[in-house]
Each structure stands twice: as structure tokens, then as C-alpha cells.
Image: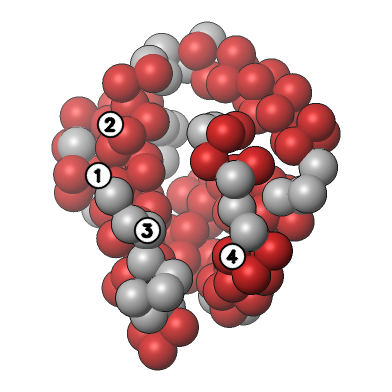
Amino acid sequence: CDERAMADLTPKERKLVTTTWAAVMQGKSKHGIALFKNIFEIAPPARALFKFGKANDLQASELARLHADRVMDTLDFAVQRLDNLGEVVPALQKLGAMHAKYKVLPAHFPIVGQALLKTLGDGLGEHWTSEVEVKR
């Protein structure tokens, strides 16, 4: 997590993030599955990192849905605490350490970020505006 970037959000930007994220969470499972589809599209070898990675239809995989929901809940945890990074950062560090045991590498995270932005752009429709889109 880019703690500095999160801390630099203006109140207006924080409100935009939280309201946009609320729209995402209305379709939590759908967006979570889309996230994993996008990860696997960007980096097919990533399938090997997941028990559900061999599933041809992620929509039909209960394991994929459960994991996708957990990922979305973790993102929600962070979004809901944009004003309390002291709580977010240690939780994400613990999660990162746990994922290291599963051979997830720091190099994998930009792929997840790219897949998340694609998921949001594809899934938010009218809520994905130039104001919401990440500026690079």
C-alpha cells in the first residue's frame, strides 16, 4: 500500500474514493471474480498460485468466489479506514507476510494493481469518471 499517496488524499478525494467504492461493493462477488479473471489474463502463470487457478469457469467456482470476496473485504477494510492508516498499514503488512508463504512476490503486486484498475474501469460504468480514474 502506498501510505504516502493515501495520506495525501484531500477530503474531497477521500469522499470520492469511499462513494465510488460503495458502488463496487454492491457487486462484491462479481467484481472480485472479475479481478481474478483480469489477473489471470494479464499473468496466466498466476493461476498456479491459487487452489482455484485451474478452474475453467471462475464464476462457478465456490473457492474462487470465497477468495474473491475475502480480497474485496480486505480492500473495503482499507477504503473504510483511509483516515486511520495506523490501523490499515499493520493489517496489510501482516497480510503480505502471510502471502509470502504462498510464494507471492512483491513483483506480483503491480499486476494486481493493473487488474484492479481494469476491473474498476470495466465494472463501474457511469461511476468510472475521469475524476475517479487514477492519474499516473
Lower position in the chain sequence, tag 2 or tag 1: 1
Q: Which amino acid does label 4 sit on?
A: Glu
Report the residue at 65% width, 21% height from top: 93
**Residue hosting label 4:** 13
How many marks are shown on the rendered structure?
4
Report the residue at 38% width, 80% height from top: 129
Q: Can residue 57 be seen in this view?
A: no
**Residue hosting label 2:** 46
Label 1 neighbourhood size at 10 Å, few (<14), some (14-19), many (20+)? some
Q: Which of 129 and 58 is in front in this view?
A: 129
Q: Do the residues labelled 4 and 3 touch (CB within 8 Å)?
A: no
Q: What element carries label 4?
A: helix
Residue 40 is tagged as 1
Image depth: mark 2 or mark 4 in front: 4
Label 4 neighbourhood size at 10 Å, few (<14), some (14-19), many (20+)? some
Q: What residue type is labelled 3?
A: Val
Work out how far the residue at label 1 is from the one at label 4, CA to CA, in angstroms. 30 Å
Lower position in the chain sequence, tag 3 or tag 2: 2
Lower position in the chain sequence, tag 3 or tag 1: 1
Work out how far the residue at label 3 is from the one at label 2, CA to CA, in angstroms. 24 Å
